[in-house]
Amino acid sequence: MKNKILKNGIITFMLLFTIAGFSQGNSANILLDAFYSKIKSQKNPQIIDARGSDEFALNHIEGAVNFNLKSEDYEKHVAALNPSQPVFIYSIAAYRSGLLSTDLAKRGFNEVYILEGGIASWIGGGKPFYSNLKSKLSIAEYKKILADNQYVLVDIGSKYCATCKTVKTILEDIRSQYGKKLKIIEIELEESPQVIADLKTVKVFPTLILYQNGKIIFKKDGLGNLKSDVDVALAQN
């Protein structure tokens, strides 16, 4: 009985703490399902894409407006927002979203939510999005590559993602070592957004997936120690 009372007390305290934090102007990183659910609960959700204008032009969440702290018309965009209503922010990762959310919180915005994993999580989770291009790679072609090769390493990312650029040099080392034994596919958001959406497994950029005969050996959300992990996996299989 005491444990139950204590548990209920802790839950109540956490709830009050969260409410108090937002009442003072705060922000919170939340996962895709919660982010999506909160957006759907709003009649006219205030969604901000904090990436660059060139990134936004290629793909974005439907209904989003595009600006960040470096935008020339930043003050105009902020003035158009309702500080008493929730604001939903995303970018590639958390950097630009974090800077923007911090500034909005200082300006008195009560609820600011940042999408954990950014646009990768949204599109990778199969949520609706706008794109001005047709995917270079289809899901059918993706599956054929898996069927035609014993080992396939898939790199999913974006040319605007700093960590994704680091992956490229590591992939070159892996390609040089394993040659034709290992097929490497590089999928970028700017070229093939639909296949990323169709996979429904991407949460962050980069995402690395190693397959053997069409089955996943490992999936990495982020770079980690990719070269070592590939070496170990191929040595064991």
Image (cartoon, rainbow, N blue to C red):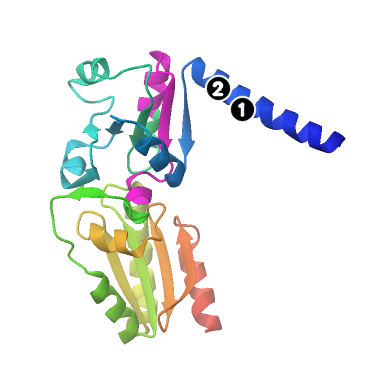
- Looking at the rendered structure, the kind of residue marked 2 is Ile
Q: How many marks?
A: 2
The image position of residue 30, as x and y in percent, is: 47, 39
Residue lying at 24% horizontally and 25% vertically, measured from the top left: 70
Residue at the disc numbered 2 = 19
Question: In terms of image quadrants, where is residue 43?
Answer: top left
Vertical position of residue 118 compared to residue 97: above or below:
below
Q: CA distance from mark 2 to mark 1?
A: 6 Å
Q: Judge whether residue 101 is colored magenta.
A: yes
Whether the residues at callouts 2 and 1 have beta carbons within 8 Å, the answer is: yes
Q: Which residue is mark 1?
A: 15
Residue 231 shown in magenta: no
Q: Give SS at disc 2.
A: helix
Any part of residue 127 in sight = yes
First to last magenta residue range: 99-122
Residue 57 x, y percent position in the rendering? 15, 42
Residue at 20 percent across and 16 percent down: it is: 76
Which dot marks residue 89?
Answer: none
Q: Residue furthest right?
A: 2
Q: Position of residue 187 (x, y in %)?
A: 28, 63
The answer to which image quadrant residue 210 occupies is bottom left
**Residue 105 location, x and y as percent?**
42, 19
Amino acid type of the residue that numbered disc 1 sits on in the rendered structure: Leu
| Residue toward you, 179 or 43 | 43
